[in-house]
Amino acid sequence: MAFRSAVITFPGSNCDRDMAEALGKISGTPALRVWHGDHDLPEGLDFIALPGGFSYGDYLRCGAIASRSPVMQAVVAAAERGVPVLGVCNGFQVLTESGLLPGALLRNSVIRFVCRDVALKVENAQSLFTAGYAAGQEISIPVAHHDGNYFADDATLDRLEGEGRVAFRYGDEVNGSARRIAGVLNAAGNVLGMMPHPERAVETTHGGTDGRALFESAIKGLVGA
Amino acid sequence: MKVRVHVSLKPGVLDPQGRAIHHSLEGLGFSGVNDVRAGRLFELDVADSTSDEALDDMCRKLLANMVIENYRIEKVAA
């Protein structure tokens, strides 16, 4: 069964091609490309990806304008129907701004743009996106962001931890994120937002392939091996 | 009608930019600055008939992120 995935491109997205390449190569079916001004998504999608970049030049707040674009209303509706949605970096910011995920991403506490491989600990290895990892597994995935400092109030953080919704945690201090959270799931488990870029770690030429299992897990979980 | 919307980070939300500005002020030799918080100011020109509810809605739906920010609406005398 073919894996129907779509990558949404906003003005200023710059990891959309990497994301489409990763989804296409790993699933064997090219990812569909959707423009932000589209009001409708292609029919029968198995997977939606919101890529990294600097949508709308990060004007107002990172991801704020993109989260109010026409296509995001369709993405929110699809997510609420249970369609899996992965948001990476700016895509994570769009997901928090759209209300699909709790919290917000603030300027890095170190002020500087952080661009390097980071160690991540897989906290929840039972989600659609993370079933290909072992719980507690340490992986290495690149980050490249200025606003990745995850913030939520203590009650929300406690709830996320209690419900197993922290998918990934940084091994070391990276950007000031509350409880070193690098990726969070929604309550239903079909929406994952993360600052690190798994699509930049899927081929040996990338210098690492630790991101590959995320896509393989999702594809396997959705359309079978 | 001219409206100013002041958006600021909620108390308790870390403000790395404010901290950097604070540090820079100290570097310039200004002493006695206890804290700096950075915010945003929007100047809107809206129809006179715009309701307070509509202004509130604009703030909540776009101008401020209610997870991390507070807003204050100030109507400016023409």
Image (tube, coloured by chain):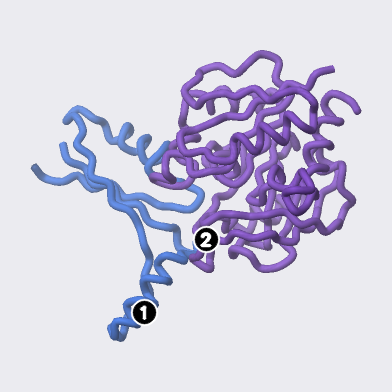
| Picture colour for chain A | purple
Is the residue under label 2 in contact with that under label 1 (CB below 8 Å)? no
Left or right of A123, for residue A6: left
Read off the residue under disc 2. A113
Q: Position of residue A84 (x, y in %)?
A: 72, 30
Q: Residue furthest front?
A: A205
Amino acid type, mark 1: Asn
The x and y percentages for residue B66 are 47, 47
Q: Position of residue A200 (x, y in %)?
A: 69, 46
Secondary element at tag 1 = loop
The residue that appears at 59% across and 54% down in the rendered structure is: A144
| Chain letter for the residue marked with disc 1 in the picture | B
Q: Which amino acid is tagged 2?
A: Phe
Location of residue A218 (image quadrant): top right
Q: Chain of mark 2?
A: A
- Nearest the eye: B64 or B73: B64
Q: Residue furthest top?
A: A43
Residue B64 visible in the current orientation: no
According to the rendering, which colour does chain B have?
blue
